[in-house]
């Protein structure tokens, strides 16, 4: 991805592991996840329409990297964004993602389905951030927000 050789991708599903990670396995996974998320900000995914990061152990800091990819417009072709199983995503992460939608030039104009961890709604500001992004006109085609 870093070399721009995956620009042909239309669907990308990255499944993490179910359950906690420990020791060296955790460190390797964490470094690989960080590299992957930073790569999403590189302008090489113009055909990508579905991005699923399932049980990818995303947290608020990781969501900042995903938000940056949205902010720079590299994910504007996304129709489906699935964050199912990422129970460590909190209010700050979801707010950052939605703020990036609003601040970006195009937002996520093709996004139809957003799947987010159910727990996100318990954090103050998350719901408001999603509503603000929707009202801004930067999510014009979003018709389904699923909570998992």
Image (tube, rainbow, N blue to C red):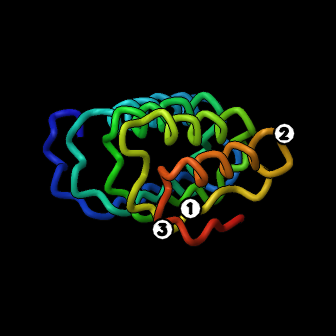
Instruction: Say few, some or many: other residues with alpha carbon within 10 Å of mark 3 (under 14 / 14 to 19 / 20 or more).
Output: some
Residue furthest out toward the front: 136
Q: Does the residue at mark 1 contact the one at mark 3 (Cβ under 8 Å)?
A: no
Q: Residue at x 83, y 42 (%)?
A: 123
Residue 63 coordinates in the image, percent (x, y): 57, 36
Question: What number is the disc on residue 112?
Answer: 3
| Helix, strand or loop at mark 3 | loop
Taking the spot 42% from the left edge, 36% from the top edge, the residue there is: 104
Q: Residue at x 41, y 57 (%)?
A: 51
Residue 20 is drawn in which quadrant?
Answer: top right
Q: Is residue 27 left or right of residue 4?
A: right
Q: Mark 1 or mark 2, which is nearer the start of the sequence?
A: 1
Vertical arrangement, residue 39 with respect to residue 50, above or below? above
Q: Position of residue 14 (x, y in %)?
A: 44, 55
Q: Which numbered disc covers residue 124?
A: 2
- Label 1 or label 3, whichever lies nearer to me, is 3
Q: Secondary structure at mark 1?
A: strand
Which residue is at 55% across, 36% downward?
Answer: 25
* Secondary element type, mark 2: loop
The x and y percentages for residue 142 are 52, 65
Q: Which residue is mark 1?
A: 114
Q: Is residue 98 left or right of residue 19?
A: left
């Amino acid at each position: 991805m870093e070399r721009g050789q995956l620009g042909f991708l239309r669907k990308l599903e990255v499944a993490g592991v179910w359950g906690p990670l420990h020791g060296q396995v955790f460190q390797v996974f964490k470094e690989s996840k960080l590299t992957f998320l930073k790569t999403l900000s590189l302008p090489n995914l113009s055909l990508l329409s579905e991005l699923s990061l399932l049980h990818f152990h995303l947290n608020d800091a990781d969501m900042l990297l995903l938000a940056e990819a949205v902010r720079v417009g590299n994910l504007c072709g996304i129709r489906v964004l699935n964050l199912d199983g990422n129970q460590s995503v909190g209010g700050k992460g979801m707010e950052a993602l939605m703020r990036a939608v609003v601040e970006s030039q195009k937002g996520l104009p093709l996004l139809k389905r957003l799947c987010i961890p159910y727990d996100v709604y318990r954090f103050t500001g998350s719901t408001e951030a999603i509503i603000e992004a929707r009202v801004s006109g930067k999510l014009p085609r979003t018709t389904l927000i699923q909570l998992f």
